Amino acid sequence: MKNLFPTAALLAALGLAACDSKTATTGEARTAPSAEAAAALTTPEAAPTSGAAAVATDEANAAPAPDPSTIPAAKVNDVAAILARPQVPILCYHQIRDWTARDSRSAKDDIVPIATFRAQIKMLADSGYHTILPDQLYAYLTTGAKLPSKPLMLTFDDTDLDQFTIARPELEKYGFKGVYFVMTVSLGRPHYMSKDQVKQLSEEGNQIGSHTWDHHRVTKYTEQDWVTQVDKSTKTLEELTGKKIKYFAYPYGLWNPAAFPELKKRGFVAAFSLSEKRDQNDPLFTVRRMIASGYWGPNALYKNMVLSF
């Protein structure tokens, strides 16, 4: 697999993947940018409408997102068709705060300074991106359902408080919604979200997903781990939100095929990894995301999105 980042500096900037585990890569990136992608590598220009301003027209043209359980099995596309669909850019954020002297060089990939985060989100809105939620992505991948133009998913891992106090109002400013993968051991602890805040995010139209109880690696699970890490955590989130928890994000982005049947029998319909290549037999349980690095200004983020997706 060839890497598409044009300079060593960009490779260094990408650094380690979420929670300092896997080195982020461009996954299934093309061996060379298409003409369209190459043209897009210039500084993004403001779109005629963006964010909240585009909702009335562009979102109206997207197909309503059905609950995955209502899609007949006969209408779900085969694996080859799912893999052939263009991937939707999915960004992953962790901490949103200013760097401190204690932060290591690699940790700064997962820590996005507040001004940088605001500039990144403004760029996405000004460039005409529209956020989608997992039900929309699932319907698109499995049936070809229509998405709004320039679809994008914004995801947040680990339940950090700044995702509520900083990210939430910034997304609201542009009519964006987010997907919050919650680690339930953290609920109510200092510097993490409370149960009421997670419930509020859900009630405001954001998606809540599972990120296990305490971030234990799925690849090392025993039978009891599935109970402690997933079953109990999922029950907590479902009681909190009053909604079925259907989507899962792997701690550290690490997965193995043995996890897929365990997640499926627990009612999950898709799972999110990081920048590793999707499983060629079960792409719905290895949906790719890209770390939005704290080193990237808005233009660098835009260029890396184009190259990776």
Image (tube, rainbow, N blue to C red):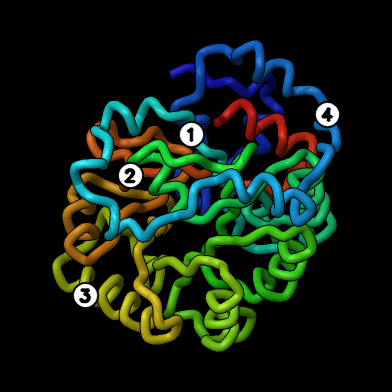
**Residue on which disc 3 sits:** 227
Instruction: Say whether disc 2 or disc 1 marks the residue closer to the N-terminus.
Output: 1
Q: Secondary structure at mark 4?
A: loop
Kindly identify the residue that appears in the image at 71 percent across and 38 percent down. 301
Residue 284: which disc?
A: 2
Q: Residues within 10 Å of mark 3 (few under 14, many from 20)?
A: some
**Residue on which disc 4 sits:** 43
Amino acid carrying label 3: it is Val
Q: Please give left or right for residue 15 compared with residue 99 in the image.
A: left
Q: Please give left or right for residue 151 compared with residue 134 in the image.
A: right
Is residue 290 among the parts visible in the rendering? no
- Residue 208, percent from left and from top: 48, 69
State if disc 3 and disc 1 touch (CB < 8 Å). Answer: no
Amino acid carrying label 4: it is Thr
Instruction: Say whether disc 3 or disc 2 marks the residue closer to the N-terminus.
Output: 3
Kindly identify the residue that appears in the image at 22 percent across and 53 percent down. 259
Instruction: Say whether disc 1 or disc 3 marks the residue closer to the N-terminus.
Output: 1
Instruction: Say whether disc 4 or disc 3 marks the residue closer to the N-terminus.
Output: 4
- Is the residue 283 above or below the residue 60 in the image? above
Quadrant location of residue 102?
Answer: bottom right
- Is the residue 60 above or below the residue 186 in the image? above
- Residue 28, percent from left and from top: 44, 26
**Residue on which disc 1 sits:** 87
